[in-house]
Amino acid sequence: MRAELIAIGTELLLGHIVNSNTAFLGRALAGQGIGCYHQVTVGDNPERLGEALRLALSRSDLVITCGGLGPTVDDVTLETIAAVTGLPLVLRPAILRKIEVRFRKLGIRMPPSNRRQAMLPEGAKELPNSLGTAPGFLLKLDHVDKCIPTAESCQYLVALPGPPYEMIPIVEKLLLPRLRKIAGGAVIRSRTIKTTGLTESEVDKKTADLLQLEGAVTMGIYARPGQVDLRITAGAPKAQAAERLIASVEKKIRQRLGSLIYGTDDDELESVVGQLLRAKRKTVATAESCTGGLIGHRITEVPGSSDYYAGGVIAYSNAVKQSALGVPASLLGKYGAVSAQAAQAMALGIREKTGASIGLAVTGIAGPGGGTKQKPVGLVYIALADKNGAKSFKHQFSGTRAMVKTKTAQTALNLLRLRLMNKLAEHPASHGEGN
């Protein structure tokens, strides 16, 4: 089935409310094997909503609207659907009684405007709303080709209330079971392969042919600071068939990217690192300058991280680098706080202070000021220290202050991951300097 989502509300267009409904609905439809081909946002305007509905019904098997079912004058969805489909609105006494009871329980007389919420297009099946006064409904439009000459017959139109806390239960409990039957059991499955260590263009170069796949299985690329995701999506009559299609593409990706892949789907880099530390029976401690505690924060976001995280020091000033980590003043004077030597000394110092198996340290220039020709904004040194000594890695990151901090934390955690996997030699900056 081809689905189209229409989000209704001028507040969405103005950016006053973030539209999370379409993201939820897209995932819910994919779980039923229904592809979402278009998503449209339109304001509380009957003419523009009518245009969106007619276009959607001319090209989609399933159209879902979200919002505009309230009792106020700017709620225009009911009347517009009636006008577009040619179906009259009919008062449903049972729905009206439920709305009246809801107001009585609140000790309020029902305003006359709420009566219109008990009216549904002729032939519509109610999708009861237990958390609000506006029910949703499902329409089978066998006659839609008569109203819209370019449309195919036997389509479905669903209208849902806008508030997510009302809409989501209706979808999960009432709509999805019906759509499951309509869709005939087909499925759409996805798997996200998460990589770090290469830029989007570098990952694209290694997987270009896979990104051009068409048909039952496709792949897309999605970049964010310090990470590139590859999402494989497959449609098939049954779940096992879709999983087999995904597995065949995933195998090729793993052969090409190897240890650049740190996880899949819900995996986060800090949780993967935590699993490795626990499996290797190692502990880590952090010494952070330019990241201001971001690495320690990410590590401790994982439940149970006290098993392997000894602690950390935010050594922003040179004085704290000296007093808390034992970095010699002479070293800072000779090489500077942003240097391979300082990063190594910080990593060795935090390891000695905490007794951790591994010391992880970062120092750099996050910007936007503070850079020089010799040491520009975005220059970062990351160091790892263990019983055999310390090794540092030089990186030059781009972007805003927040992006530099994010990329530094991501790269530092990835270096720790590779160290625990004995794969450091595969890192692009594996020429890092040792002490």
Image: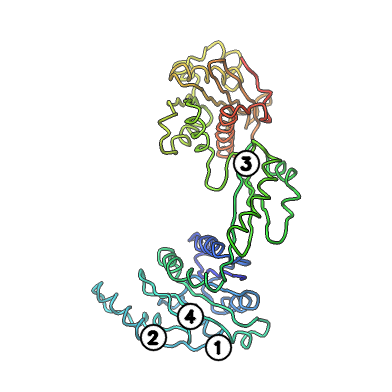
Q: Measure how far apart labels 4 and 2 are at the Cα level.
A: 14 Å
Q: How is the image coloured?
A: rainbow
Q: Amino acid at mark 4?
A: Leu
Residue 195 is tagged as 3
Is 168 rendered above or below residue 247? Answer: below
Q: Measure how far apart labels 3 and 4 are at the Cα level.
A: 46 Å
Local secondary structure at mark 1: loop
Read off the residue under disc 1: 86
In terms of sequence position, does the residue under pointer 4 or pointer 2 come before the other? 4
Q: Position of residue 176 (x, y in %)?
A: 49, 68
Q: Amino acid at mark 1?
A: Gly
User: Is mark 3 in CB contact (under 8 Å) with mark 2?
Assistant: no
Q: Measure how far apart labels 3 and 1 are at the Cα level.
A: 51 Å
Local secondary structure at mark 2: loop
Local secondary structure at mark 4: helix
Q: Which residue sits at x=62%, y=67%?
A: 38
